[in-house]
Image (spheres, helix red, strand yellow):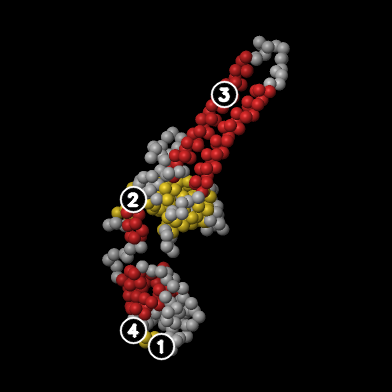
Amino acid sequence: MKEATIQLPRQMSTLAADIDSMYYFIFWVSVVFFVAIVGAAIWCMIEFRASKNPQATPPGHHDVLELFWTFAPLILLIPMFHYGFKGYVQAMVAPSDAIEVRVRGKQWAWDFYYPGDTEPSPAELVVPVGRPVKMSMSSQDVLHSFFIPEFRVKRDVVPGMYSSVWWEALETTSTYNAATNKVEGEALDLFCTEYCGRSHSQMLAKVHVVSDADYKAFIAGKDKAPEGKDLAEVGAELYKKNACNTCHSIDGSALVGPSFKGLFGKNESFEDGSSSPADENYLRQSILQPQAKIVKGFAGKNMPPFVLKDWKLDALIAYIKSVK
Ligand code: CUA
Protein backbone atom coordinates (compact mmCIF):
# COMPACT_ATOMS: atom_id res chain seq x y z
CA MET A 1 0.00 0.00 0.00
CA LYS A 2 1.22 3.49 -0.84
CA GLU A 3 0.89 6.24 1.72
CA ALA A 4 -0.99 9.46 1.06
CA THR A 5 0.69 12.11 -1.08
CA ILE A 6 0.06 15.84 -1.08
CA GLN A 7 -2.57 15.29 -3.79
CA LEU A 8 -4.09 11.86 -3.13
CA PRO A 9 -5.07 9.79 -0.09
CA ARG A 10 -3.36 6.46 0.57
CA GLN A 11 -4.02 3.65 -1.88
CA MET A 12 -6.27 1.13 -0.13
CA SER A 13 -7.60 -0.91 -3.05
CA THR A 14 -6.18 -2.87 -5.98
CA LEU A 15 -7.72 -0.28 -8.34
CA ALA A 16 -5.86 2.64 -6.79
CA ALA A 17 -2.36 2.21 -8.27
CA ASP A 18 -3.52 2.26 -11.91
CA ILE A 19 -5.89 5.15 -11.36
CA ASP A 20 -3.14 7.16 -9.66
CA SER A 21 -0.54 6.52 -12.40
CA MET A 22 -3.10 7.69 -14.94
CA TYR A 23 -3.79 10.76 -12.84
CA TYR A 24 -0.10 11.62 -12.44
CA PHE A 25 0.57 11.05 -16.15
CA ILE A 26 -2.14 13.57 -17.09
CA PHE A 27 -1.01 15.90 -14.32
CA TRP A 28 2.64 16.00 -15.46
CA VAL A 29 1.73 16.29 -19.15
CA SER A 30 -0.38 19.31 -18.15
CA VAL A 31 2.48 20.79 -16.11
CA VAL A 32 4.93 20.42 -19.03
CA PHE A 33 2.51 22.02 -21.48
CA PHE A 34 1.65 24.81 -19.07
CA VAL A 35 5.33 25.70 -18.63
CA ALA A 36 6.05 25.40 -22.38
CA ILE A 37 3.08 27.49 -23.52
CA VAL A 38 3.27 30.20 -20.86
CA GLY A 39 7.10 30.24 -21.23
CA ALA A 40 6.84 30.69 -25.00
CA ALA A 41 4.26 33.45 -24.57
CA ILE A 42 6.50 35.34 -22.12
CA TRP A 43 9.55 34.87 -24.34
CA CYS A 44 7.61 36.24 -27.34
CA MET A 45 6.44 39.26 -25.34
CA ILE A 46 10.02 40.15 -24.51
CA GLU A 47 11.64 39.22 -27.80
CA PHE A 48 9.07 40.96 -30.00
CA ARG A 49 8.36 43.97 -27.80
CA ALA A 50 7.27 47.18 -29.52
CA SER A 51 10.37 49.22 -28.57
CA LYS A 52 12.65 46.69 -30.28
CA ASN A 53 10.36 45.96 -33.27
CA PRO A 54 8.53 49.18 -34.17
CA GLN A 55 7.68 47.72 -37.60
CA ALA A 56 5.41 44.59 -37.46
CA THR A 57 6.79 41.59 -39.42
CA PRO A 58 4.04 38.93 -39.47
CA PRO A 59 5.35 35.34 -39.84
CA GLY A 60 4.44 33.21 -42.84
CA HIS A 61 3.01 29.72 -42.89
CA HIS A 62 5.13 26.85 -41.51
CA ASP A 63 3.92 23.35 -42.50
CA VAL A 64 6.25 21.40 -40.24
CA LEU A 65 5.28 23.43 -37.21
CA GLU A 66 1.56 23.04 -38.03
CA LEU A 67 1.91 19.27 -38.37
CA PHE A 68 3.88 19.08 -35.14
CA TRP A 69 1.31 20.73 -32.93
CA THR A 70 -1.53 18.83 -34.56
CA PHE A 71 -0.03 15.37 -34.11
CA ALA A 72 1.95 15.79 -30.88
CA PRO A 73 -1.24 16.08 -28.76
CA LEU A 74 -2.73 13.09 -30.60
CA ILE A 75 0.24 10.95 -29.63
CA LEU A 76 -0.33 11.93 -25.98
CA LEU A 77 -4.12 11.47 -26.15
CA ILE A 78 -3.96 7.92 -27.50
CA PRO A 79 -2.34 6.43 -24.36
CA MET A 80 -4.60 8.59 -22.17
CA PHE A 81 -7.67 7.12 -23.88
CA HIS A 82 -6.25 3.59 -23.93
CA TYR A 83 -5.34 3.45 -20.23
CA GLY A 84 -8.37 5.51 -19.25
CA PHE A 85 -10.78 3.19 -21.02
CA LYS A 86 -9.03 0.09 -19.69
CA GLY A 87 -9.20 1.47 -16.16
CA TYR A 88 -12.85 2.39 -16.61
CA VAL A 89 -13.79 -1.11 -17.73
CA GLN A 90 -11.80 -2.59 -14.86
CA ALA A 91 -13.54 -0.34 -12.35
CA MET A 92 -17.03 -0.98 -13.78
CA VAL A 93 -16.98 -4.77 -14.10
CA ALA A 94 -16.75 -6.60 -10.79
CA PRO A 95 -15.21 -10.09 -10.65
CA SER A 96 -17.94 -12.73 -10.63
CA ASP A 97 -16.91 -14.03 -7.19
CA ALA A 98 -17.34 -10.64 -5.52
CA ILE A 99 -19.30 -10.42 -2.28
CA GLU A 100 -22.36 -8.36 -3.12
CA VAL A 101 -23.62 -5.78 -0.66
CA ARG A 102 -26.83 -3.92 -1.42
CA VAL A 103 -26.60 -0.22 -0.75
CA ARG A 104 -29.54 2.12 -0.42
CA GLY A 105 -28.99 5.83 -0.31
CA LYS A 106 -31.67 7.98 1.20
CA GLN A 107 -31.90 11.52 2.55
CA TRP A 108 -29.52 11.49 4.47
CA ALA A 109 -28.10 8.11 5.31
CA TRP A 110 -26.60 4.96 3.86
CA ASP A 111 -28.16 1.54 4.48
CA PHE A 112 -26.30 -1.70 3.81
CA TYR A 113 -27.75 -5.16 3.25
CA TYR A 114 -25.21 -7.96 3.51
CA PRO A 115 -25.83 -11.11 1.44
CA GLY A 116 -29.13 -12.64 2.56
CA ASP A 117 -30.16 -9.67 4.68
CA THR A 118 -33.68 -8.33 4.63
CA GLU A 119 -32.98 -5.84 7.39
CA PRO A 120 -30.57 -2.98 6.72
CA SER A 121 -27.42 -2.25 8.73
CA PRO A 122 -27.16 1.52 8.72
CA ALA A 123 -24.18 3.88 8.76
CA GLU A 124 -21.40 1.28 9.06
CA LEU A 125 -19.98 -0.92 6.32
CA VAL A 126 -17.73 -3.86 7.18
CA VAL A 127 -15.81 -5.55 4.35
CA PRO A 128 -13.12 -8.24 4.23
CA VAL A 129 -9.55 -7.54 3.09
CA GLY A 130 -8.17 -9.22 -0.05
CA ARG A 131 -11.53 -10.17 -1.54
CA PRO A 132 -13.53 -8.40 -4.23
CA VAL A 133 -16.56 -6.64 -2.80
CA LYS A 134 -19.31 -5.21 -4.98
CA MET A 135 -21.76 -2.51 -3.96
CA SER A 136 -25.07 -2.84 -5.76
CA MET A 137 -26.59 0.58 -5.23
CA SER A 138 -29.89 2.36 -5.58
CA SER A 139 -31.54 5.42 -4.13
CA GLN A 140 -34.82 5.68 -2.30
CA ASP A 141 -35.39 9.34 -3.16
CA VAL A 142 -32.99 11.71 -4.95
CA LEU A 143 -29.62 11.55 -6.63
CA HIS A 144 -26.73 10.63 -4.30
CA SER A 145 -23.14 9.65 -4.96
CA PHE A 146 -21.07 6.96 -3.30
CA PHE A 147 -17.45 7.98 -2.72
CA ILE A 148 -14.66 6.26 -0.78
CA PRO A 149 -11.46 8.20 -1.63
CA GLU A 150 -8.98 5.58 -0.34
CA PHE A 151 -10.51 2.91 -2.61
CA ARG A 152 -10.69 5.35 -5.58
CA VAL A 153 -14.35 4.48 -6.14
CA LYS A 154 -17.07 7.02 -6.81
CA ARG A 155 -20.36 6.60 -8.57
CA ASP A 156 -23.81 8.14 -8.68
CA VAL A 157 -26.61 6.42 -6.74
CA VAL A 158 -29.76 7.00 -8.70
CA PRO A 159 -33.46 6.52 -7.90
CA GLY A 160 -35.16 3.95 -10.13
CA MET A 161 -32.02 2.11 -11.28
CA TYR A 162 -29.04 0.16 -10.02
CA SER A 163 -25.44 1.26 -10.29
CA SER A 164 -22.39 -0.44 -8.85
CA VAL A 165 -18.81 -0.09 -7.75
CA TRP A 166 -16.39 -2.74 -6.57
CA TRP A 167 -12.99 -2.95 -4.96
CA GLU A 168 -10.56 -5.31 -3.31
CA ALA A 169 -9.09 -3.78 -0.16
CA LEU A 170 -5.33 -4.10 0.35
CA GLU A 171 -5.09 -3.73 4.11
CA THR A 172 -7.21 -4.01 7.24
CA THR A 173 -8.20 -0.92 9.18
CA SER A 174 -10.16 -2.55 11.98
CA THR A 175 -10.80 -5.66 14.02
CA TYR A 176 -14.01 -7.30 15.16
CA ASN A 177 -14.51 -7.74 18.87
CA ALA A 178 -16.80 -10.73 19.40
CA ALA A 179 -17.26 -9.98 23.10
CA THR A 180 -18.85 -6.58 22.48
CA ASN A 181 -20.10 -7.44 18.97
CA LYS A 182 -18.42 -4.26 17.71
CA VAL A 183 -15.90 -3.37 15.00
CA GLU A 184 -13.07 -1.17 16.25
CA GLY A 185 -10.36 0.71 14.40
CA GLU A 186 -9.48 3.59 12.08
CA ALA A 187 -12.37 3.37 9.66
CA LEU A 188 -12.35 4.97 6.23
CA ASP A 189 -14.91 7.64 5.36
CA LEU A 190 -17.73 7.16 2.90
CA PHE A 191 -19.04 10.43 1.52
CA CYS A 192 -22.07 11.46 -0.50
CA THR A 193 -20.69 13.68 -3.26
CA GLU A 194 -23.89 14.82 -4.90
CA TYR A 195 -25.72 17.73 -3.33
CA CYS A 196 -28.88 15.98 -2.15
CA GLY A 197 -30.57 18.49 0.10
CA ARG A 198 -30.26 20.22 3.39
CA SER A 199 -28.23 17.64 5.33
CA HIS A 200 -26.16 16.38 2.40
CA SER A 201 -22.88 17.03 4.23
CA GLN A 202 -24.03 14.75 7.06
CA MET A 203 -24.66 11.82 4.73
CA LEU A 204 -21.62 9.88 5.88
CA ALA A 205 -20.74 6.33 6.85
CA LYS A 206 -17.74 4.48 8.24
CA VAL A 207 -16.03 1.74 6.24
CA HIS A 208 -14.12 -0.91 8.19
CA VAL A 209 -11.77 -3.31 6.42
CA VAL A 210 -11.30 -6.44 8.53
CA SER A 211 -9.62 -9.84 8.09
CA ASP A 212 -11.58 -12.59 6.39
CA ALA A 213 -12.05 -14.40 9.73
CA ASP A 214 -13.25 -11.19 11.39
CA TYR A 215 -15.66 -10.57 8.53
CA LYS A 216 -17.18 -14.03 8.94
CA ALA A 217 -17.43 -13.52 12.70
CA PHE A 218 -19.02 -10.12 12.18
CA ILE A 219 -21.61 -11.54 9.77
CA ALA A 220 -22.38 -14.38 12.19
CA GLY A 221 -22.53 -12.04 15.20
CA LYS A 222 -24.58 -9.41 13.42
CA ASP A 223 -27.66 -11.57 13.86
CA LYS A 224 -26.71 -13.10 17.19
CA ALA A 225 -29.38 -13.57 19.81
CA PRO A 226 -29.30 -10.81 22.41
CA GLU A 227 -27.92 -12.18 25.66
CA GLY A 228 -29.51 -11.98 29.09
CA LYS A 229 -33.02 -11.41 27.75
CA ASP A 230 -36.14 -13.48 28.14
CA LEU A 231 -36.70 -15.54 24.99
CA ALA A 232 -40.42 -14.70 24.78
CA GLU A 233 -39.55 -11.00 25.08
CA VAL A 234 -37.11 -11.30 22.18
CA GLY A 235 -39.84 -13.13 20.27
CA ALA A 236 -42.29 -10.29 20.94
CA GLU A 237 -39.84 -7.87 19.29
CA LEU A 238 -39.37 -10.19 16.32
CA TYR A 239 -43.15 -10.53 16.00
CA LYS A 240 -43.28 -6.78 15.30
CA LYS A 241 -39.97 -6.47 13.44
CA ASN A 242 -40.90 -9.21 10.96
CA ALA A 243 -44.41 -7.76 10.65
CA CYS A 244 -46.12 -10.99 11.84
CA ASN A 245 -48.59 -8.68 13.60
CA THR A 246 -50.05 -7.49 10.31
CA CYS A 247 -51.61 -10.96 9.76
CA HIS A 248 -51.64 -12.68 13.17
CA SER A 249 -53.36 -11.00 16.09
CA ILE A 250 -52.64 -11.76 19.74
CA ASP A 251 -56.16 -10.94 20.97
CA GLY A 252 -58.06 -13.76 19.26
CA SER A 253 -59.35 -11.69 16.33
CA ALA A 254 -58.85 -13.25 12.89
CA LEU A 255 -56.81 -11.02 10.58
CA VAL A 256 -55.30 -12.52 7.42
CA GLY A 257 -54.05 -15.58 9.33
CA PRO A 258 -55.03 -17.40 12.52
CA SER A 259 -54.60 -15.50 15.80
CA PHE A 260 -51.74 -16.47 18.10
CA LYS A 261 -53.95 -16.23 21.18
CA GLY A 262 -54.21 -19.63 22.85
CA LEU A 263 -52.74 -21.24 19.75
CA PHE A 264 -50.05 -23.33 21.41
CA GLY A 265 -51.27 -26.81 22.33
CA LYS A 266 -54.63 -26.35 20.64
CA ASN A 267 -55.83 -29.08 18.29
CA GLU A 268 -55.71 -27.50 14.84
CA SER A 269 -57.86 -28.74 11.90
CA PHE A 270 -56.57 -28.37 8.39
CA GLU A 271 -58.04 -27.81 4.94
CA ASP A 272 -57.16 -31.37 3.85
CA GLY A 273 -59.31 -32.79 6.65
CA SER A 274 -56.43 -33.83 8.91
CA SER A 275 -55.66 -32.35 12.29
CA SER A 276 -52.74 -32.13 14.71
CA PRO A 277 -51.85 -30.42 17.97
CA ALA A 278 -50.16 -27.02 17.53
CA ASP A 279 -46.81 -27.97 19.08
CA GLU A 280 -43.28 -26.63 18.54
CA ASN A 281 -42.73 -28.64 15.36
CA TYR A 282 -46.02 -27.50 13.88
CA LEU A 283 -45.21 -23.83 14.59
CA ARG A 284 -41.69 -24.18 13.20
CA GLN A 285 -42.95 -25.75 10.00
CA SER A 286 -45.70 -23.14 9.65
CA ILE A 287 -43.10 -20.33 9.72
CA LEU A 288 -40.60 -21.99 7.36
CA GLN A 289 -43.09 -23.67 4.99
CA PRO A 290 -46.46 -21.98 5.54
CA GLN A 291 -48.16 -23.93 2.75
CA ALA A 292 -47.42 -27.37 4.28
CA LYS A 293 -50.49 -27.31 6.54
CA ILE A 294 -53.30 -24.85 5.90
CA VAL A 295 -55.63 -24.20 8.78
CA LYS A 296 -59.30 -24.75 7.96
CA GLY A 297 -60.82 -21.49 6.73
CA PHE A 298 -57.52 -19.92 5.65
CA ALA A 299 -57.12 -21.42 2.16
CA GLY A 300 -55.64 -19.09 -0.44
CA LYS A 301 -54.06 -16.67 2.05
CA ASN A 302 -50.56 -17.61 0.91
CA MET A 303 -48.25 -16.56 3.71
CA PRO A 304 -44.72 -16.22 2.30
CA PRO A 305 -42.09 -18.59 3.74
CA PHE A 306 -39.77 -16.89 6.23
CA VAL A 307 -36.03 -17.45 6.34
CA LEU A 308 -35.08 -17.12 10.00
CA LYS A 309 -32.18 -18.19 12.14
CA ASP A 310 -32.85 -20.93 14.69
CA TRP A 311 -32.66 -18.53 17.64
CA LYS A 312 -35.28 -16.36 16.01
CA LEU A 313 -37.54 -19.37 15.49
CA ASP A 314 -37.01 -20.39 19.14
CA ALA A 315 -37.85 -16.87 20.27
CA LEU A 316 -40.97 -16.62 18.12
CA ILE A 317 -42.21 -20.01 19.30
CA ALA A 318 -41.54 -19.00 22.93
CA TYR A 319 -43.53 -15.84 22.32
CA ILE A 320 -46.46 -17.69 20.70
CA LYS A 321 -46.48 -20.06 23.71
CA SER A 322 -46.73 -17.05 26.00
CA VAL A 323 -49.79 -15.59 24.25
CA LYS A 324 -52.48 -17.31 26.27
CU1 CUA B 1 -26.75 12.19 -0.56
CU2 CUA B 1 -25.52 14.22 -0.80
Asked if disc 4 is less than 8 Å from ligand 1, the answer is no
Circle 2 residue: 211
Q: Tags 1 and 2 in contact by the CB under 8 Å rule?
A: no
Identify the residue position indicated by label 1 in the image. Answer: 274
Which of these two is toward me, 321 or 75?
Answer: 75
> Element type at marker 2?
loop
Of helix, strand and loop, which one carries label 1? Answer: loop
* Residue in the foreground of this view, choosing between 69 and 297: 69
According to the picture, the residue beneath numbered tag 4 turns out to be: 265
Q: According to the image, label 3 marks what residue?
A: 36
- Write the residue at 34% across / 81% down: 279
Which SS class for mark 3? Answer: helix
The crowding category of the residue bearing disc 3, from other C-alpha atoms within 10 Å (few below 14, some 14 to 19, many at least 20), is few
* Type of amino acid at the residue the image marks with label 2: Ser
Upstream in sequence: badge 2 or badge 4 = 2
Measured along the vertical axis of the image, is residue 140 above or below residue 41?
below
Question: Is 11 situated above or below 54?
Answer: below
The answer to whether residue 250 is seen in the rendering is no
Residue at figure coordinates x 45%, y 43% from the top left: 15
Q: Which is more N-terminal, label 3 or label 1?
A: 3
In space, the residues marked 1 and 3 are separated at their CA atoms by 92 Å
Indicate the position of residue 190 as horizontal and vertical percent values.
44, 48
Mark whose residue sits in front, 4 or 3: 3
